[in-house]
Amino acid sequence: MKLASIVLGIVVAAAPAHAAVSGFHDSAEQIGTILSSPEVADSLRQAPVDSITTTGAGGDGLHEWRVRTRDCDLAVHLKPVQPKGIGKTTYLVDTVGECR
């Protein structure tokens, strides 16, 4: 039994750890990724942003956001990138829809 406890302790210690980040900081990370994307800026025709709203995560694991300007409604999908070890999840722009 003592050996099983030691082995379990080693397995748990070797498993990758994920830092818990508050919802505020996670959404700020996603919004920062959107606003720093040249592809999003070009799709919005460099217009000022009126609003950014999330529509949630889809079954494919991508996070969908809507970016609105006066003349454009744009869907942006973000792909989460898990850290290799301890750290926070970051995001990459996966797809940018057409300006509508």
Image (cartoon, helix red, strand yellow):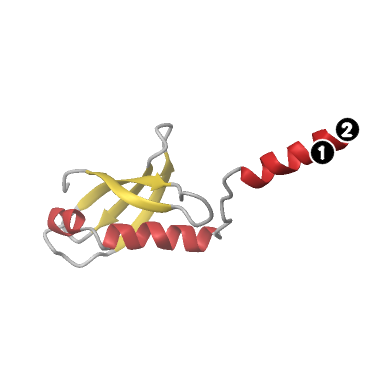
Classify residue 4 as left or right of residue 47: right
Classify residue 92 as left or right of residue 56: left
The N terminus - image quarter: top right
Please state which of residues 63 and 82 is positioned toward the viewer in this rendering: 82
Q: Quadrant of residue 45?
A: bottom left
Residue type highlighted by circle 1: Ser
Q: Position of residue 79 (x, y in %)?
A: 36, 44
Q: Outermost residue toward the front? A: 3
From the image, tell me which residue sits under label 2: 1
Q: Which mark is residue 85?
A: none
Asked if residue 9 is positioned above or below residue 87 in the image, the reply reads above
- The residue that appears at 50% across and 62% down in the rendered structure is 24
Q: Position of residue 29 (x, y in %)?
A: 40, 60
Dot 2: few (<14), some (14–19), or many (≥20) neighbours within 10 Å?
Answer: few
From the image, tell me which residue sits under label 1: 5
How many marks overall? Answer: 2
Dot 1: few (<14), some (14–19), or many (≥20) neighbours within 10 Å?
Answer: few
The local secondary structure at tag 2 comes to: loop
Q: Position of residue 54 (x, y in %)?
A: 40, 51
Asked if residue 60 is positioned above or below residue 45 in the image, the reply reads above
The local secondary structure at tag 1 comes to: helix
Asked if residue 89 is positioned above or below residue 51 in the image, the reply reads above
- The residue that appears at 39% across and 32% down in the rendered structure is 60
Residue type highlighted by circle 2: Met
- The residue that appears at 38% across and 40% down in the rendered structure is 62
Classify residue 98 as left or right of residue 19: left
Q: Quadrant of residue 51?
A: bottom left
Q: Position of residue 97 (x, y in %)?
A: 21, 43
Disc 2 to disc 1, C-alpha distance: 6 Å
- Dots 2, 1 in contact, CB < 8 A: yes
Please state which of residues 87 and 62 is positioned toward the viewer in this rendering: 87
